[in-house]
Amino acid sequence: MATDRIEAPSRAGLDDLQAPVVERVMANQFTLILGLIAALVMGIVGLLLTGIVPARRGPHPWLAWPLLALSVVVLLAALRQLLWPVALIEATTRGVRLKIRAPLSRRGLFFVPWSHVQAAVLTQVATSRGAREAALGLQIMQDKEIRLPSMRWNSAHAAPDAPNCNVVFAASVIKGDVVEWVRKIEGCRESARMGVRERVRT
């Protein structure tokens, strides 16, 4: 994959909300439903561990309250995405918006200009069963203008020996064919790179 840096026409990281959206990668609804079920199960287990609901084993509040808090966050995030969907990735003419910051609002979209996107690649993530799953990965150049958040919602880690990326979306969380999405987003990046070159020539 090409890793040419595209010179940005304006300050890196400044999102242009008027820039046309070329591609939208939405979340897989089946995965969101599984997330709802997992959150409900965690919530029930958390209630049992608090001792509020009678159970055979004694209460474990040190484990119960963090589990309940996590279940509420996952439940609300999954419901928010099901009822008021926001794209996981928006590819615009100026860069990509990634839903990796806050799980519950549109403000969670993190903008990266094409000048800092080195490539969109097909990578892999490790599953809980030890297998591998295809994933869409973005190689992003970080500097004083672009610094990815340490907590990246919806983003996984590339599997060992797979192409290393800064942001990774597993195929199971993406609606549609992950290979096709990699091709489309890399195509958007290449188009932006060619557009900048044409402007420089003229």
Image: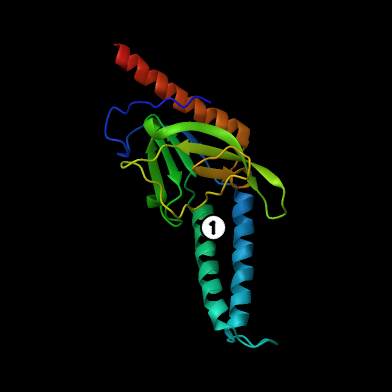
Which element carries disc 1, helix, strand or loop? helix
Residue tagged by mark 1? Answer: 78
In the image, residue 97 lies at what x, y percent? Answer: 42, 41
Q: Quadrant of residue 116?
A: top left
In the image, residue 114 lies at what x, y percent? Answer: 40, 31
Q: Is residue 20 visible?
A: no
Q: Seen in the image, is 196 located left or right of residue 170?
A: left
Identity of the residue drawn at 53% across and 26% down: 1
Identity of the residue drawn at 59% across and 83% down: 60
In the image, residue 144 lies at what x, y percent? Answer: 31, 42
Identity of the residue drawn at 56% across and 44% down: 169
| Neighbours of disc 1 within 10 Å: few (<14), some (14-19), many (20+) | many
In the image, residue 6 lies at what x, y percent? Answer: 37, 26
Q: If the image is split into quadrants, where does the C terminus sit?
A: top left
Up/down of 54 relative to 81, above or below: below
Identity of the residue drawn at 40% across and 24% down: 192
Q: Quadrant of residue 61?
A: bottom right
Colouring convention used in this rendered image of the protein = rainbow
Amino acid type at circle 1 is: Ala
Up/down of 129 relative to 14, above or below: below
- Which residue is the extreme one toward the top? 202
